[in-house]
């Protein structure tokens, strides 16, 4: 049966209504979602039929994204490899369960989030080890590790610390949206929540983060630099940024 | 007076991102301290987002995950096959199993070398330290990538009798005997310390009513780890996660042998129950049930590895197993058996305190502090490197009587430049090793709750090759109780043992760095 809002596309009516009720969005959104072509679909089909090259392509294509998402959700670099491995083992075992109702990347992200949640749940009762960065006894003699790179690493670590303090629900939305660039609608699918909830969580996550940045001794230096620039240049935006603050 | 109402978070974000509302908000920000601080934090956050987006991938080496997936593919393929034969009437399961099987097959095909033939063969040098080629002539084939050209090791003549590194020999009565040059052993076992490397050869004895004799040989510098029969399991496989710790042990009489980590032309020969297995550049498992002289060998070479295993049964028949195949038990094809003939050479013995590496003739051996081997007589140059990276040298003529070098005979060479590795290089390696350290802590915490919450400083010294030479630990907490001290020393020993296994790129000279470790538990 044809959907009234999607003349080119045959859509199962039950899915159509379910999707509308679920996301509480205008009809055109559902049409866009269904109309979008999953670039991985063909690869998945080929992989399931035993095509080795397709499987390899899927793995290579998505492994960096998965590892990055895992790293950000965990906030502990030492566990990234293990958890990423766990994700791909799950992908491997349950690829045949992928029905193609969402994009493969959405399915993969959802699976990643679930594996990370499971890992964090298991980890909660276990002792923790915090190892800091190695401190070489001697300093580099010829710019192997420029001060800018050290500062940048410190800033990134400080931000990661603040993000880790957010509640898991807020953290997931913030990371998926702001760092992985996943649209809110897709996050809703990944996390199984309404889009409105995604936006609300994103709003409050950012709000908490802004407050924390203003208080953080490492990151407030950036804010101070912005303040200085604000004084000299009344409208500093990211678009006009050409150098580090 | 502040113009306008306070802007919303969204408005400030829009202004920070694209300059929207700037005209309207600029004046407000100039007067409102609170909103200005909010705006600064927003701009800072957006800036940080860009920096994070440009940061490098958290995983740089995917080989371990690929290996695990490879094993999973094998497992799934086997499970699917079994399920198919057992449950032909379950359509849903059947479909799932088929798809899993297809995926598994796809993965296996992908992980296998794409165009090279699976069964690569390395033709052995007759001047191998094991003596004249004892194995049946392997079939001719292209030389695999990364293997040395024929004749590269032609100068490494002689037969390594024993020993380098920490090798312990236990006789049949479990009494430990210090291994000595040219010592022959019968039965018993040899143990290599956990994760240590050992390079040795044992003289084969005449088969004695089916009793096995071990003979392990290494043609050149190589890393060999032999895992004990008891410990052979998933965790101990070469594809296992880092941190699986087993004691290396070679059972000479019976049991299961697990071999990994071969390089170039190295090979290993195992004699058990009348069988003789020569493993050439392959990662494999060997099951020998040599009880009472009867043996049923099952040999499996891991897919993805190169090389082959040659097996000669007690009747002199031999069979070649190529990488990627599984050898059915008790299946043999006929061929003549060849024998090992020892090569005579002059003994050379060096003992040097704190030695970690020996360079003799044109080969290099890791370990110390003793070296004992047999070489063809002639002029030789010996270099010894100690744990601090200092090098000592001696040039001598080795005659047929042999030579014993005392430490005073070695002269120090000028010290090398201090090495350096940037934190970007050190950090990933330390991070990768952290799970093992955590396991140490968890294990000891189970029996010693007094270690709850602890900070330890780990000071590591690398030699010029990037090998961890010394690991020093210092606890911030003062442990006064004997029980606490014992727990701490147990933890330190475990951490030290793990840290000694880390491998770093060559820093160009000895260097050190510190890592503070904070242990806490909820």
Image (cartoon, coloured by chain):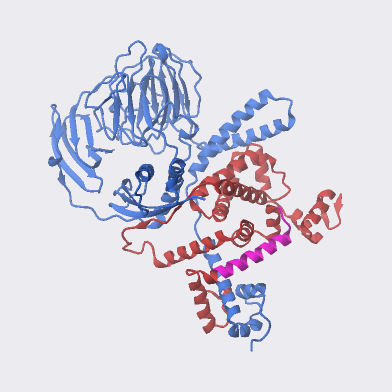
Chain colours: A red, B blue
Query: Quick check: B280 above or below A161?
Result: above
Residue B280 at what x, y percent from top left?
A: 39, 28
Query: Quick check: A45 above or below A17?
Result: above
Q: Residue furthest front?
A: B481
Residue B519 at what x, y percent from top left?
A: 44, 51
Which quadrant, please, contains the N terminus of chain B? bottom right
Q: Main secondary structure of the magenta part?
A: helix
Res B123 seen here: no
Instruction: Give the left or right position of residue A87, taking residue B433 as reference.
Output: right
Instruction: Give the left or right position of residue B521, taking residue B404 as reference.
Output: right
Q: Quadrant of residue A53?
A: top right
Q: Is residue A200 magenta?
A: yes
Counting the numbered discs, the total is 0
Residue A232 at what x, y percent from top left?
A: 52, 84
Q: Residue furthest bottom?
A: B1
Q: Closer to the camera, B388 or B148? A: B388
Instruction: Give the left or right position of residue B317, taking residue A16 as reference.
Output: left
Tell me the residue at 23%/45% (across/down). Answer: B386
Q: Closer to the camera, B100 or A60? A: B100
Query: Quick check: A148 above or below B69?
Result: below
Query: Quick check: B436 above or below A31?
Result: above
Q: Quadrant of residue A230?
A: bottom right
Residue B74 at what x, y percent from top left?
A: 56, 32
Q: Closer to the camera, B492 or B498? A: B492
Res B346 seen here: yes
Q: Is residue B253 magenta?
A: no
Residue range in magenta is: A192-212
């Amino acid at each position: 049966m044809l959907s009234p809002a999607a003349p080119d596309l045959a859509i199962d009516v039950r899915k159509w209504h379910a999707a509308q009720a679920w996301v509480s969005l205008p009809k055109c959104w559902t049409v866009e979602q269904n109309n979008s072509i999953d670039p991985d679909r063909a690869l998945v089909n080929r992989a399931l039929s035993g095509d080795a090259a397709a499987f390899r392509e899927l793995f290579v294509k998505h492994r960096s994204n998965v590892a990055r998402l895992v790293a950000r959700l965990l906030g502990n670099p030492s566990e990234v490899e293990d958890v990423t491995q766990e994700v791909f083992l799950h992908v491997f075992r349950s690829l045949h369960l992928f029905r193609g109702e969402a994009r493969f990347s959405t399915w993969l992200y959802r699976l990643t989030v679930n594996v990370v949640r499971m890992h964090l749940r298991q980890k909660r009762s276990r002792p923790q080890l915090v190892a800091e960065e190695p401190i070489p006894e001697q300093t580099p003699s010829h710019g192997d590790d420029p001060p800018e790179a050290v500062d940048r690493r410190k800033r990134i670590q400080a931000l990661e610390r603040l993000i880790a303090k957010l509640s898991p629900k807020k953290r997931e939305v913030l990371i998926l949206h702001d760092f992985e660039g996943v649209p809110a609608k897709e996050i809703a699918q990944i996390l199984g929540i309404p889009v409105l909830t995604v936006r609300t969580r994103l709003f409050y996550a950012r709000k908490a983060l802004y407050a924390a940045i203003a208080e953080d001794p490492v990151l407030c230096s950036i804010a101070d630099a912005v303040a200085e620039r604000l004084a000299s240049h009344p409208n500093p935006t990211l678009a006009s940024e050409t150098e580090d603050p | 007076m502040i113009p306008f109402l306070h802007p919303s978070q969204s408005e400030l974000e829009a202004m920070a991102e694209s300059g929207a509302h700037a005209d309207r908000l600029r004046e407000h920000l100039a007067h409102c301290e609170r909103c200005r601080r909010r705006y600064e934090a927003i701009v800072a956050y957006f800036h940080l987002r860009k920096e994070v987006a440009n940061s490098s991938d958290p995983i740089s080496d995917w080989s371990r995950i690929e290996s695990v997936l490879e094993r999973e593919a094998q497992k799934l393929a086997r499970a699917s096959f079994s399920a198919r034969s057992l449950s032909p009437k379950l359509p849903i399961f059947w479909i799932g199993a088929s798809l899993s099987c297809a995926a598994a097959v796809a993965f296996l095909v992908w992980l296998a070398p794409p165009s090279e033939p699976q069964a690569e063969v390395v033709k052995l040098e007759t001047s191998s330290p094991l003596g004249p080629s004892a194995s049946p002539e392997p079939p001719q084939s292209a030389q695999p990538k990364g293997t040395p050209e024929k004749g590269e090791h032609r100068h490494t003549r002689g037969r390594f009798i024993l020993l380098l590194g920490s090798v312990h020999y236990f006789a049949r009565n479990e009494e430990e005997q210090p291994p000595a040059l040219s010592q022959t052993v019968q039965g018993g076992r040899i143990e290599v310390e956990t994760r240590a490397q050992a390079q040795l050869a044992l003289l084969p004895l005449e088969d004695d009513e089916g009793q096995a004799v071990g003979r392990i040989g290494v043609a050149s510098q190589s890393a060999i780890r032999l895992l004990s029969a008891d410990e052979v399991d998933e965790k101990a496989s070469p594809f296992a996660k880092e941190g699986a710790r087993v004691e290396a042990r070679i059972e000479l009489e019976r049991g299961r042998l697990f071999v990994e980590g071969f390089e170039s032309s190295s090979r290993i020969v195992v004699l058990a129950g009348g069988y003789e297995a020569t493993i050439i550049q392959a990662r494999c498992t060997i099951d020998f049930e040599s009880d009472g002289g009867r043996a049923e060998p099952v040999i499996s070479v891991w897919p993805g590895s190169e090389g082959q295993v040659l097996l000669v049964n007690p009747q002199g028949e031999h069979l070649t197993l190529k990488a990627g195949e599984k050898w059915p038990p008790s299946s043999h094809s006929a061929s003549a058996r060849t024998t090992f003939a020892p090569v005579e050479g002059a003994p050379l013995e060096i003992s040097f305190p704190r030695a970690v590496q020996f360079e003799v003739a044109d080969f290099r051996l890791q370990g110390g502090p003793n070296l004992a081997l047999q070489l063809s007589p002639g002029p030789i140059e010996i270099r010894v490197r100690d744990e601090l990276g200092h090098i000592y040298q001696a040039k001598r003529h080795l005659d047929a009587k042999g030579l014993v070098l005392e430490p005073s005979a070695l002269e120090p060479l000028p010290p090398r430049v201090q090495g350096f590795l940037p934190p970007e290089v050190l950090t990933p390696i330390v991070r990768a090793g952290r799970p093992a350290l955590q396991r140490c802590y968890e294990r000891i915490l189970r029996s010693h709750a007094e270690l709850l919450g602890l900070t330890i400083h780990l000071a590591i010294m690398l030699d010029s090759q990037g090998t961890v030479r010394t690991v020093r630990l210092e606890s911030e907490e003062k442990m006064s109780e004997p029980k606490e001290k014992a727990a701490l020393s147990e933890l330190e020993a475990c951490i030290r043992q793990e840290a000694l296994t880390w491998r770093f790129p060559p820093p160009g000279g000895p260097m050190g760095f510190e890592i503070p470790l904070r242990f806490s538990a909820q």
